[in-house]
Image (tube, rainbow, N blue to C red):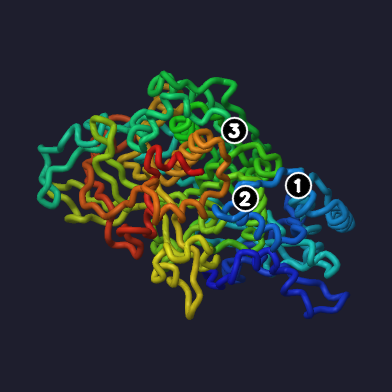
Amino acid sequence: MRRSVVVAGVTALLAGVTAVNAGTSSASTPQTVPGSHPAWARSSALVDDVSQTHPVTFRVYLAMRDCVGAETTAMAVSTPGNPAYGHYLSTAQVRARYAPDATTVSTVSSWLREQGVTVDQVPANNAYVEATGTAAQVDAAFGIRLGNYTVDGRTRTAPDRDLSLPDSLASSVIAVSGLTQTFAEPLSIPAVAPAPNGFRNSAPCGTYYGQKIDTTDPTYGGTHLSYAPCGYTPPQLRSAYGIDTAVRGGLDGRGQTIAIVDAFASPTVYSDAAEYSRRNDPSHPLLAWQFSQHVFPENADQEVACDASGWYGEETLDVEAAHGMAPGANILYVGASDCLGASLDVGLNYVVANHLADVVSNSYGDQGEDVPTSDVNAFHAIAIEATLEGIGLDFSSGDDGDEVANVGHPEADFSASDPLVTAVGGTSLGIGSTGRTVVQTGWETGKSTLSAGEWTPAAPGSYLYGSGGGTSGLFAEPSYQVGVVPDALAAQNHTGDDRGRVVPDISMDGDPNTGMLIGVTQTFADGVYYDQYRIGGTSLASPLFSGVVAVANQFDHFEHGFLNPRLYGFTSRTSAITDVNHVNGGVVRVDYINGIDDTAGLRTSVRTFDDPSLTIHTTSGYDDVTGLGVPKGSAFLALA
């Protein structure tokens, strides 16, 4: 069921509709939008047809003018040594040279109105035309039948075939999004239950790694392990990554804006983040003028399917982590109307089209790459524009390791697999009493539970979760990875001489067992109020990294934009990135069974580091768990 088509180059995605149509049709023949029908929308999975009167909002994404030239320029302005390096285009220049023109917008809008649908809006960069109509009108306009399908225990809406367009429009349209439901998942892992349901870490836990050793339970693999940290604070994380001196000296990201895109919006996100800073980083408060948000109207139909309130902890984590690493930067929170990939793309496009940020942290993703080509096209066009304008896009690489358990074979996750984003993986991080890193390895957790005086299963335990990584079957190997990523990794999921994009690019702390302390308003039996707990996931790693990039931008008086070409150039000549290698070990965790207190008892488990059972492994040099490694202090800040 998963997509296995290899795309020879990313520009081929955006040129796909035109290329397929050229020379294959007459003027009167409707043209299909390739890849707009997902493989999982099979007749055997059909539950029922969408009611013909059901309102449907969708977006028709328009082709850039000179897409190949746009992507070539995007790579040129991002590649050190190129004469164009750092000469980013303004939003006005991008619109004048590459954005869909007014005539195209008008033509597509007129056609949509002829189909009886209402044209709602067009964003500032003309990326798409948004429209709303009944399912009957949508079915007739695109020659499809919208249906509800059961997929992995979840009901999703999709067309029953590829969409059709008049051939007069085919070369102008790269995607129609919003008709196929692809649910993005937040990539944060709290210890047991998601916020806003009340959760607390149980004692014993340490204020730093190694503070408290479990000597009362049996050894694990012959060793008494440290209890898990209670959750690192921003000063500890800044120290571990070597930027604390810079931040204390005023190089704290001021003058930069970090945008965070998630689904929905916590009503207490600012007050929670401000309280968190007061408690855990009082020298660096989150001031009201530093924080702003743009929240799209909430899609009530998707509240249950998306677990709307479950995203509150995710976005609060993102804000607190980004501010923790770059306490002088401005934070813009953008809340999408729901967790569907098409809606999250609208949120991201809002930031890019209006150049509202210098770096964007995105802590969500799909399981694998089984995403309609139309949605990939839409996202990639946004990524091209961000790169042209010098906006860096950071994406969490995933929390399910190689995805074998979910999709049946190794696969990278989209959107992290797009070659124009920086995919941020996760590590297990031990910060010692002095704030220095004492343990660091790839985050792939194994679990053993204490039962009847024994650890079950015995070391190394059963795989639980970990940093996403692997080789894309969708995107070809980008030039910046050639010669750095081992050929054996790039060749996975490919045949012959084909090579693929490998994820991640870089990593930071992601292990929820060595994670960050966050503060969120939660619901407890005795009321609704602020409390704190430890959290992890590559959702932590991405905003941590975005914060470091914001500090680097200020440090160098330079907007670094899309970082990958520079990151991969570091490996042979600088110490700006610390290589991450395999380390055995783990921590002991004690959890409340009910998540909030000991009335239902306690559960003790060992969470091991860098579980070896996956197809992805932490090794010397580039690897598909931690990428190039982790940022290293002032050497990394001097990116320019």
Depicted 455 relative to depicted 196: above or below: below
Q: Which mark is residue 93?
A: 1
| Residue at which label 3 appears | 332
Q: Secondary structure at mark 1?
A: helix
Label 1 neighbourhood size at 10 Å, few (<14), some (14-19), many (20+)? Answer: few
Residue 310 visible in the snapshot: no
Q: What residue is at 77 percent from the left and 48 percent from the top?
A: 95
Single out the mark in the foreground, 2 or 3: 2
Tell me which corner region of the image, top left, top right, bottom left or bottom right, holds residue 91. Answer: top right
Q: Earlier in the sequence, mark 3 or mark 1?
A: 1
Q: What residue is at 84 percent from the left and 56 percent from the top?
A: 104
Label 2 neighbourhood size at 10 Å, few (<14), some (14-19), many (20+)? Answer: many
**Residue 135 location, x and y as percent?**
75, 56
Question: Are circles 2 and 3 on residues that touch, CB within 8 Å?
Answer: no
The answer for how far apart the CA atoms under marks 1 and 2 are is 13 Å
| Residue at which label 2 appears | 387
Tell me which corner region of the image, top left, top right, bottom left or bottom right, holds residue 559. Answer: top right
Nearer the observer, 476 or 375: 476
The answer for how far apart the CA atoms under marks 3 and 1 are is 24 Å
Depicted 28 relative to depicted 342: above or below: below
Q: Amino acid at mark 1?
A: Gln
Q: Secondary structure at mark 3?
A: strand
Depicted 519 relative to depicted 123: above or below: above
**Residue 367 location, x and y as percent?**
49, 57
Nearer the observer, 535 or 69: 69
Single out the mark in the foreground, 3 or 1: 1
